[in-house]
Image (cartoon, grey):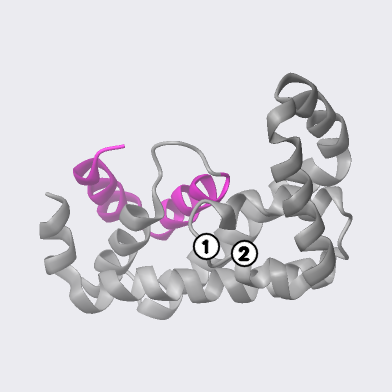
Amino acid sequence: MDVQLLTDYFYRYGGIVIFIIVFLEYLNLPGFPAGVVMPLAGIWASKGGIGFGWALLLSVLAGLCGSWVLYLLGRYGGDFVLKKYIKKHPKHQELIEGIMERLRKRGYLGLFFGKLIPMFRTIISIPAGILKLNFVWYSVFSGLGILIWNLVFVGAGYFFGDTVLNMFT
């Protein structure tokens, strides 16, 4: 998705665009990179479209909703998909089992830190669902990780505004 197009959407439709685009980004869909989406939300907030607090809150809520979708996919269909994937790609089995074991051992703290690692931060929701981590605690630790991640990126856009936008155009 083009930066100018995203900027136009922010100005035209407001906070709902922040929610929708961040939600799609947390589903790990191609074309919605956090390094572009989040700073644009901050830039839009700095220009008076919405306050920084609201932009951050919308982004965290959207991140949680996207994470919940992946968690539920993992919880209610993850074992089946994982077995099919490993059957098709047996070389990945050791890596996947290692990730699952680390998450099993480190639990919610591992989940929290996983939410701070690019790419892994969205995918970790699926193994968390497969392991059937408690949904409330999953939400708390995911929310904290999402808050920190989004604070950095939305804050960068808000505080560095046009400088960040000029880097992408």
Residue shown at 55% from the left, 51% from the top: 26
Residue beneath disc 1:
117
> Is 83 located above or below residue 74 in the figure?
above
SS at circle 1: loop
SS at circle 2: helix
> Is residue 9 one of those drawn in magenta?
yes
Within-10-Å neighbours for mark 2: few <14, some 14–19, many 20+: many
- Looking at the picture, how far across and down is residue 56, in whole percent? 45, 72
Q: Amino acid at mark 1?
A: Ile
> Is 149 located above or below residue 4 in the figure?
below
Residue shown at 27% from the left, 69% from the top: 157
- Looking at the picture, how far across and down is residue 165, in whole percent? 16, 59
Q: Which residues are magenta?
A: 1-27
Residue 81 lies left or right of residue 21; in this view the side is right
Residue 121 lies left or right of residue 96; in this view the side is left
Q: Amino acid at mark 2?
A: Gly
Within-10-Å neighbours for mark 1: few <14, some 14–19, many 20+: few
Quadrant of the rendered image containing residue 131: bottom right
Residue 6 lies left or right of residue 29; in this view the side is left
Residue shown at 71% from the left, 69% from the top: 110
Question: Label 1, label 2: how many angstroms apart (C-alpha)?
Answer: 5 Å
Residue beneath disc 2:
114
Q: Main secondary structure of the magenta part?
A: helix
- Looking at the picture, how far across and down is residue 97, in whole percent? 79, 46
Residue shown at 79% from the left, 44% from the top: 74
Quadrant of the rendered image containing residue 48: bottom left
The numbered mark at residue 81 is none
Residue 123 lies left or right of residue 46; in this view the side is right
> Is residue 3 one of those drawn in magenta?
yes
> Is 118 located above or below residue 55 in the figure?
above
